[in-house]
Amino acid sequence: MKSSLGTVRLASVFRLMIVLSVSLWLAVPAPACTTLVLQGQDRLYFGRNLASIREKFGDLAALAEGQLLRIKTYTCAEGGTEKSTKMSVQQVDPKLAQKLMAKNNIVVLDIRTPEEFQDGHIAGAINIDFLDKDFEKNIAGLDKNKSYLLHCASGNRSSRSLPVLKKQQFQSIYHLDGGMNAWKKAGMPVEK
């Protein structure tokens, strides 16, 4: 009984800390070269502060209900940008990703290692290794106005690459939730 009460109190304190942290972003303007990223369970929210995120994405009530997984800020040196970009990021599951690929002109951007890519990839995918020291330089040549289905193996590297893509001024990203692992688990076609 005592441990469960402690857990409830800890969860309440954690939620309060999140609300206070997020509230500060409303009242305190961020430096020009800062990007705020809120990671919910099904979506990433980007903006200079909470007000700009609300303006782009609408009501964030779901985040207030304990759906917020992480708050992160990025400075210029970490991938933030002084230029205002309007990068749209939508989390998609494998089935929706396949439908989008069939209906739209979407480029599949696989940021796993070349070895992982050779073991199996989505048909027509471009492979640019996120772990390569020249990743940012390598993606700079891509057309920023196209829509990209971004993925890695599980979603970790692709999530970490989003600030770099924003800095490079990409406009439209569909982030494959769960990455290639989820794609395979859903029984979607894999090319070797």
Image: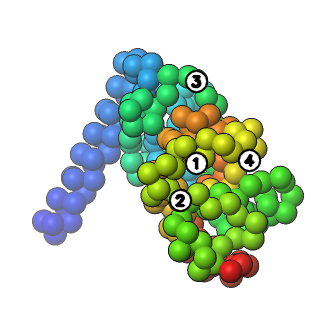
3 or 2: tag closer to the N-terminus: 3
When asked about the image quadrant of residue 77, the answer is top left
Q: Which residue position holds label 2?
A: 129
Real-space Cα separation, disc 1 to disc 2, in angstroms: 9 Å
When asked about the image quadrant of residue 55, the answer is top right
Mark 3 element type: loop
Real-space Cα separation, disc 4 to disc 2, in angstroms: 19 Å
4 or 2: tag closer to the N-terminus: 2
When asked about the image quadrant of residue 152, the answer is bottom right
Q: Amino acid at mark 4?
A: Ser
Real-space Cα separation, disc 3 to disc 2, in angstroms: 26 Å
Could you say where residue 126 lies in the image, as x and y percent from the top left?
A: 68, 60
In contact (CB < 8 Å): disc 3 and disc 4:
no
Q: Which residue position holds label 4?
A: 147
Could you say where residue 149 lies in the image, as x and y percent from the top left?
A: 68, 56
1 or 2: tag closer to the N-terminus: 2
In the picture, the disc for residue 91 is: none
The 10 Å Cα crowd at callout 1, few under 14, some 14 to 19, many 20 or more, is few
| Image quadrant in which the N terminus is located | bottom left
Q: Amino acid at mark 3?
A: Ser
Q: Which residue position holds label 3?
A: 84
In contact (CB < 8 Å): disc 4 and disc 1:
no
Q: Which residue position holds label 1?
A: 138
Residue at the extreme left: 2
The 10 Å Cα crowd at callout 3, few under 14, some 14 to 19, many 20 or more, is some
Could you say where residue 98 lies in the image, as x and y percent from the top left?
A: 76, 66
1 or 3: tag closer to the N-terminus: 3
Mark 4 element type: strand
Q: Amino acid at mark 2?
A: Asp
From the image, state whether disc 1 or disc 3 is nearer to you.
1
Mark 1 element type: helix
